[in-house]
Amino acid sequence: METYQIETKNLFVYYHDKDILKDINIKIPAKQLTAVIGPSGCGKTTLLKSFNRLLEIQEDVRVTGEIIVDGENILEHKGSEVPDIRKKMGLLSQKPYPLPMSIFENIAYGVRIHQKKTKEELAKIVEYCLQEAGLWNEVKDRLHDPASRLSLGQQQRLCLARAIAVQPEVLLCDEPTSALDPISAQQIEKLLLKLKKDYTVILVTHTLRQAKRVADYIIFLYFGMVIEQGPADEFFSNPKSPETKAYLSGEIS
């Protein structure tokens, strides 16, 4: 029986009273890679940010409905509980944003906030996360150099290592390869495929080719509505709705 990490019921998101997401009812399978696709401006990033309640940072945003994570509607959680929700959701942004500190401290910083660890334990966590992100061999001799000296692709893998350091359940990835060269983008894709054995990965992508390569499950948004969702093989081989067929054929983009 399939288990679901996140489920939304009648989810609406309003900016300045304009509905950006409209009656979203989806189920995201646990420990699979779900790709959220659709034309620019259809609400993909808004959906992603609703899962860790980052939308609330912005003024004039209103969210209604339910977002159920681990059996609880996280929209009912009070302010003091929001950091715990965000700890469950590692975030990888479109552009890498390393903290203005060393490579080592980029990983260690979040761990120190959430847990008490000895120096030895912290060093092991940093090594493990950099190994998981495919970066350890490239940086092990310069862990105390500023993270800003890394290449763009290395910075994105560092941000991925930082995201998993606090042991989230979900990785929210907002077009994480769009600013990268093809080789770096391929490295990130391979890492996400590897990490889905331990995490539920939700990938917003603007490229159909990428979704075909990596996704187990697809959610297709159009004008803020879910048009179609389902296993990736079925979605691409047997699309049901006219909008999906038009999007896959390139008629709408």
Image: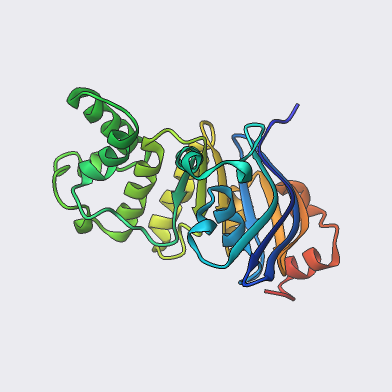
Question: With 243 as the anchor, is 30 left or right in this view?
Answer: left
Q: Is residue 48 above or below residue 5?
A: below
Percent position (x, y) of residue 13? 66, 61
In this rendering, is residue 243 above or below 195?
below
Quadrant of the rendered structure where residue 43 is?
bottom right
Q: Nearer the viewer, residue 154 or 161?
A: 161
The image shows residue 29 at horizontal and vertical percentages of: 67, 38
Q: Quadrant of the N terminus?
A: top right
> Residue at (65%, 60%) from the top-left corner?
37
Residue 152 vs residue 105: left or right?
A: right
Q: Nearer the viewer, residue 164 or 197?
A: 164
Question: Residue 251 falls in which quadrant of the image?
Answer: bottom right
Number of marks in the image?
Answer: 0
| Residue at screen point 61% across, 38% down | 32
Query: In this orientation, does residue 96 appear?
Result: yes
Q: Is residue 246 left or right of residue 84?
A: right
Seen in the picture, residue 190 relative to 223 is either above or below; the reply is above
